[in-house]
Each structure stands twice: as structure tokens, then as C-alpha cells.
Amino acid sequence: MPKRAKYSIWRTKRAYLYIIPSLILFFFFFLYPLIYTLYISMTNANFFNIMKEPTFYGLENYKTLIFEGKFFNPFIKTILFILTSVPLKVFTGLLLAVLFSSSYIKARRILFSLIIIPWSAPWFFLVLIWRGMFNQDFGIINQFLRSIGLMPINWLNDIKNAFISYNIVEVYLAYPFVTSVIFAAIQSIPSDLYESAIVDGANAWIKFRYITLPLIKKSILWATIMTTMASYLIFGVPFLLNRGGPARENEFLLIYGYKESFDFGYYGYGAAFMVLVFIILTILVIVFLRLTRMLEE
Amino acid sequence: MKIKILSILLTTFAILLIIIALIPFYWIVLCSIRPYSTLYTTEVALIPTNITIDAFQRVLFESKFFIWLRNSLIVYIITLFVCMLVTLPASYSFSRFEFLGKKTLLSSYFILSQIMSGMSVIGLIALYTLLMKLKLINSLITLGFVYAAYNVPFISWYLKTYFDTLPKNFDEAAFVDGASFIQNLRYVVLPIAKPGIIVAIIFITIITWSEWVIASMLLGSENFTLAVGLVSLQVRWETPWNLFAATSILYALPIIIVFIIAQRYLKSGLTLGGIKG
């Protein structure tokens, strides 16, 4: 077989021809708006002048955001949310994966496919259900609390409780993913590793600590990275539960940017905010890429 | 004996966790079949009395359900058609050719697909302004194109990795015989690539069916899709819960069934990241 000749068939400029239609579509509806965000962010575009030409503002919006500390508040809230939700998501997922892959569990595979059923439903449909379940009066959670003699909790109209609610719902939405990733890693561990450990008289903890954990470390890291990105970009859950309320006290990055633009009509200011969010996101992605590459080696 | 007790305990615990995880599903069904008068009780009522399908009847015959469904289907069909039309040749080209920038493009596609739902919010201000200036707003066709574009990164990447698994000798031979790229794709690759293409279609279906952030910005209330309509029922209009519950079940059930049937095939793509938003 003339290998070199074959290679030339596959190495060609024509390849671009077949990619260009998808690039045009992607550019027009995704990349171009993203670049245009940069332009809007340097104008005073708002609800009233958006159809005409807004005045050029330079870096005025950025100054307000950075030097008047407007960026700081939502940013800190988001960091706080990452610090609570990511460990909760990963730990819940890990626990479930270990539990459902335990050899003591009967009909493991069937039970596992049942525990990840929430994955099958559209996520915002589940968030809307949770919104009802958190309802002060007829929500099932408060009904239950009352029935066992506890005080009902004001879930969504209290700053702290709302924050807790977001965490609960986010864990509920994320655990099927985390559990599946770690479960798959556990399944791929050869069973003779455990058998020789049992011969050596290892107990369950030793087996987990010295056999399972080192072999699923990578999946845990992967799940942590993914859930961190999701938590950094959190939008839907607080938006649907109470629009980042009460009293704008739980507005994370994307919620703040969205509300400033679409609820209050400050498009230019909102766009500048989104640009800052994007810059930090890019830094996060680069750090995570380095991290995964380091582990590959 | 000790092992047996441990086994029973752990299995019971696992089943208990499954029950807790499924409470939201049970609760929404419960809300949809209870009469309106008993709905807003403060007592726990886990076993329904006086089951009624009144809510479903009202949703199907008196609400905008079918208008929303029609709108959703229009958007979905445009998305599917446009997205497949551009990503199939692109991903085949990615899989079979070597060219400058291929690796960078593919890895950016992969990273983007993991954060697409967040990116859609970041870019929403500009997308909204641009489309408004071009007078393309409040159109189901525009939304179909937007969704198609947002699916390009993941679908291109997914189909490329799928095409990579197909044996290359078939189409290589066809190329040597003088078949064109498109002929090759149409007659040689597509027939054997059906499983991968079906999975890609299911991914597009799930993503499109459950998108509401962009849609709620771009569509007026006469053009609502099911997803936006459903969010508005709750967040904007405070609809009675039994009607909301019935609508949401009618909306979500098809997608849940599709997902459960195809789960085995989807998992390889899903466990890679937060594709579902």
C-alpha cells in the first residue's frame, strides 16, 4: 500500500469548504454577538436609545463596575456559592456512587439506573417543581415539617434560606452526572485488586482509601471541574426560584448582569458586566485545562 | 449472617434514597390529579383522594397548549434540519482530513459545549440587540437558527468522534475510485453511521426542547414555545398548580421517555460534562 500517496488525499485545503457553512452559522449567531457585547459595553446603550445609536462611553461602565465595587458584590456571592455547592455536589455524587457500587447492594445496576432518573427530565422543569415544593403553605416540604411538629420554613423569601434552597436544588440537578462519572470509574476497577486485599485482611475503609480512591481520583477531579464551572455560571436555579431575591440579595454573576440589562434596561452597563464575567471564565478554563493536562502526564 | 444484615440494611437505605430522589416526580403527578379545591392544603396528603383528570382536560382543550406545542415543533424542526445540514459535512471533514487549525477548533468546540448554557446568557444582550435591529426578533425561524448555531460545537465534536470510530477503508476506497466528498458522505458513510446520527439527533432534541432563556427573550407571548410557556405559567402568571402540573407533565413526559430509552447510548456523551445545562 503506498502510504504516502494516500496521505495526500486526506490532507487538503478542500476540508475547509465543508466546515465553512457551520462556521458561518456559528459566527453569525454566537461569535458575532459575543464580539458585539464588547462594543455595547463601551456605550451608554439603554432601554430608550438601543434602537438609535447609543453614545460612545469608552471605559466608563468598566470604571463604575470596578472602582465603585458594583462587580464585587455578585462576584463574592458567586464565590460563596461555589464554595458551598461544589463540595456538596461532588460529595453527594461520590457517596452515592460508592454506595450503589457496593457489593452488599442487591440488584445494583437496576437501583443505580433508578437513582439517576432525575437526569432524564428537563432541568428547568425540575426547578419549577422545586419552586412549588418550597412553597410556604402548600409546598410538600413545609407540609412535612408541620406534620412532624416543626415550624414551617420560609424557604424562598429569606436571604439565607433561599441560598440554602439553591444549594439543595443544584445538588439535586448535578448529582446524577457526578454519580455516573464516578460510578463508571469504580466499575472499571478490576475486581482481583480487591480480592488480593481481602486475602491480606484489609477492611472496607482500607480498601476504599488505598484501592478505590486512587483509581477514581481523576473522575472526581473531572466532576469537580465541571461542577465548578456550572456553579460559576449559575443562572437558571435562582432565576426561576425567586429571581435572585429577596431584595436582590442573592444575585449571582449572570443573574445580576441579566437583570441590569433586561429588568432595568441598562444594556451597556450589563454588557460590560458580562465581559468581566467572560474574562474570569476564560481564566478559569485555562487553569482547569492546565490542571487536567498536568494529571494526564 | 452479619453480611446478610448489612446487605439488607444497605439495600433498604439505597431504596429510601431512590424514593427521596423521585419525590418531585410523584408530587407533580399528585398535583395534576387532585381537584383544585384540595390543592392548597397545609396538611401532608401523599395519597390522592378524589382523583380527577379535570386539569389535563382543561390544559388540552382550553389552554394554549397546542399553540405552544406547534411553535416548539416548528423551532425544533428548523434547528434539527439546519444543524444537521451544516454539522454532518463539517464533522466528516474533521474526521477524515488534516488541516491547519483543526485541533484548536475542535478543542474550543469541546470546551464551549460544556459551558454553552452560561455562554448563552453572557451573549444574550448583544444577540437581542442585534436581532432587534435586524428586525429578526419574535420569529420562530430565527430562534431555530439560533438554536442550530448553539448546537454546532457539541454536535460537530460528537459526530467527529463518532466518525472516527468508523472504519476508514470503505470511504478511502471510494475516494480512490473518484467519488466526491459529498457522494462519499451520502452513500458510504451515512448508511453505516446511523447510530451516531440518532444519538446526535437525541442530543439536539433534549437541548432544544428544554431551552427557555433565549426563547423568553426573543419571543413574544403569541409565539411562545412550550418551555417558555411553562416558565411563564409559573413565574409570570401564577397559574393554579394543578393546571401548571398537568402542562408540565405533558411537556416533560415525551422527553423523559426518549431519554430513558436512549440512556445507554447517551451516557458516553453525557458523562463528559454538563451538556444538559
Image: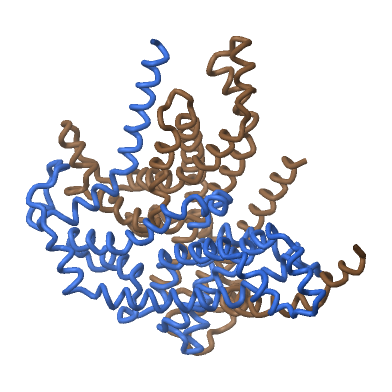
Chain colours: A brown, B blue
Task: Give above or below for B239 relative to A53.
Answer: above
**Position in image of residue B170 (x %, y %):** 73, 66
Judging depth in this view, the residue of B161 and B251 nearest the camera is: B161
Residue at 72% x, 48% y is A290
In this view of the protein, can residue A64 be seen by the observer?
no
Choose top left, top right, bottom left or bottom right for residue A259: bottom left
Task: Give above or below for A220 relative to A46.
Answer: above
In this view of the protein, can residue B195 be seen by the observer?
yes
Quarter the N terminus of chain B occupies:
top left
**Position in image of residue A43 (x %, y %):** 56, 78
Judging depth in this view, the residue of B41 and A163 nearest the camera is: B41
Q: Is residue B23 left or right of residue B56?
A: right
Q: Is residue B92 left or right of residue A74?
A: right
Count of numbered circles on the image: 0
Judging depth in this view, the residue of B150 and B156 nearest the camera is: B156
**Position in image of residue A184 (x %, y %):** 56, 39
**Position in image of residue A28 (x %, y %):** 60, 80
Task: Give above or below for A44 relative to A180.
Answer: below
